[in-house]
Amino acid sequence: MTRHLLLAATAAFALPATLHAQTMPIVPDAEVSALRDAALQDKYAWDLVEGLTTEVGPRLAGTEAEARARTWAEAHLKGMGFANVHIETYQMPVWERGTETARIVSPFPQSLTLTALGRSAATPPEGIEAEVVYFPTFAEMMAAPAEAIRGKIVFVSNDMAPTQDGSGYGANGAARFVGPSFASQKGAVAMIIKSIGTDSHRTPHTGGTNFAEGVTPIPAAALSVPDAEQLERVFERGQPVRLHLTLTPRDSGMQESGNVIAEVPGSDPDAGIVLIACHLDSWDLGTGAIDDAAGCGIVAAAAKHIMEAGQPRRTIRILFAGAEEVGVFGGDAYYEAHKDEPVVLVSESDFGADRVWRVTTNLPGDADAIGKRVAAALAPLGIVAGSGKAGGGADVGQFARNGTAVIDLDQDGTRYFDLHHTPDDTLDKIDPEQLRQNVAAWTAMLAVVADAPEAIGPVPNDE
């Protein structure tokens, strides 16, 4: 493609000569604008998301279902016309869930709805029964002496509020990310948490937990938000609470997973590679529509629109990473295999399918103009330029942490954690209009970045 970058200093957009050049507004290139606007009618993203979630469904990492997803994605990307489509495999440890039940034995017998956390240990087949010790916050559990926890089932609650930027996940997620490991070190026989979510449905949120080296894994599960609130009210009655818990997940050893890769070849081999990513695997409760079939649909559709317009200067490489949910095995494997290649910029879509509202960058100083042109091209879509530094997603995180330039297109996360890692993560939750806005944003960003005449070097540590 030929791009003619139109700046505000051109005669068509003349401003008073007294205005300092740095304050002049940047006008998006006409071709970039045309590609962006055409992508608002996109059908490629929905076609991919609908096909993947219908014909494959849930795609737990390392399982036969994820293998079918790789085969499906390889064929679909070839059908879209991409070049160099192939699968790169690796080995990873696989965890699969089993029976999941819980019931209050006393003082008020009743069943509770919950789901095991990834890497949870199993109870005996007949389950376990123990007294429950309740901590309203993770910090309170951490401060408790081991004597208060030893031999008991730990219950940690939290109150995650919806936010546009999803910041509540980091603020509340420690109870899931590392809570069971600390509970085990204090002698707990199991741990249950209120789901890390913002909904009010009896749909518990799964997700991985991590046991530190040398720590014995214990059974760990998440209650749905209403069930956790019910248990809180039981504790308010002031009586001891006993729970019967059955979780029978299993570790099935080292199994094959893999990444699916495709390209839009660039015209200038020396200009580098723009890596755009999503993750192909999902948790097993829903069909992984928002997490992350949508992201795969978005990045593939945007690359397709660029490809249809002609050949970009830089190669655009698509990474459908495997095994992100259970430990970023795909992203790490990709980095180790490709870290010496000229990847000059990375970006990832892995936060659902609602509209992009903000763009942030982390570019070297001599590529600052690229970021300004990207922001100008996105502004007509209602996307604001953020002041923070882009960090990239999980699957491109190693590139970002090692100095590769990054652009983040931040999606609205207000309702994301209503659905995240639940049985409700299904196709009907995707708004096609918002999905198309994502594609338009990604198309505009790629149109600018892939053809930018500036070099995109590493980001210095102090930038």
Image (cartoon, rainbow, N blue to C red):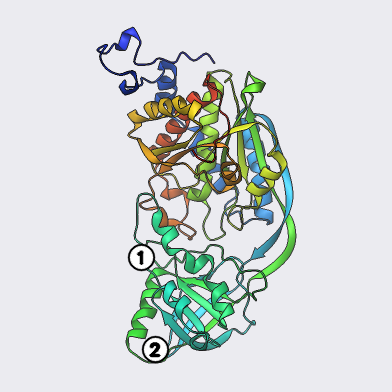
Q: Residue furthest front?
A: 462
Q: Residues within 10 Å of mark 2 (few under 14, many from 20)?
A: few
Residue 118, relative to residue 318: is it above or below? below
Mark 2–mark 1 Cα distance, whole angstroms, equals 22 Å
Above or below residue 147? Residue 202 is above
Using the rendered image of the protein, determine whether residue 315 is visible from the camera's viewpoint: yes
Tell me the quarter of the picture where residue 254 sits: bottom right
Numbered disc 1: secondary structure: loop
Badge 1 local density, few (<14 within 10 Å), some, or many (20+)? few
Q: Nearer the viewer, residue 437 or 79?
A: 437
Q: In this rendering, is residue 313 above or below 110?
A: above
Q: Which residue is mark 1?
A: 200
**Three-letter amino acid code at the position of disc 2:** Phe
Query: Which is nearer the N-term, disc 2 or disc 1?
Result: 2
Q: Position of residue 427 (x, y in %)?
A: 47, 48
Mark 2 secondary-structure assignment? loop
Three-letter residue code for mark 1: Ser
Q: Nearer the viewer, residue 401 or 411?
A: 401
Residue occupied by mark 2: 108
Instruction: Provide residue 180's location: percent of width, then percent of height.
Output: 55, 73
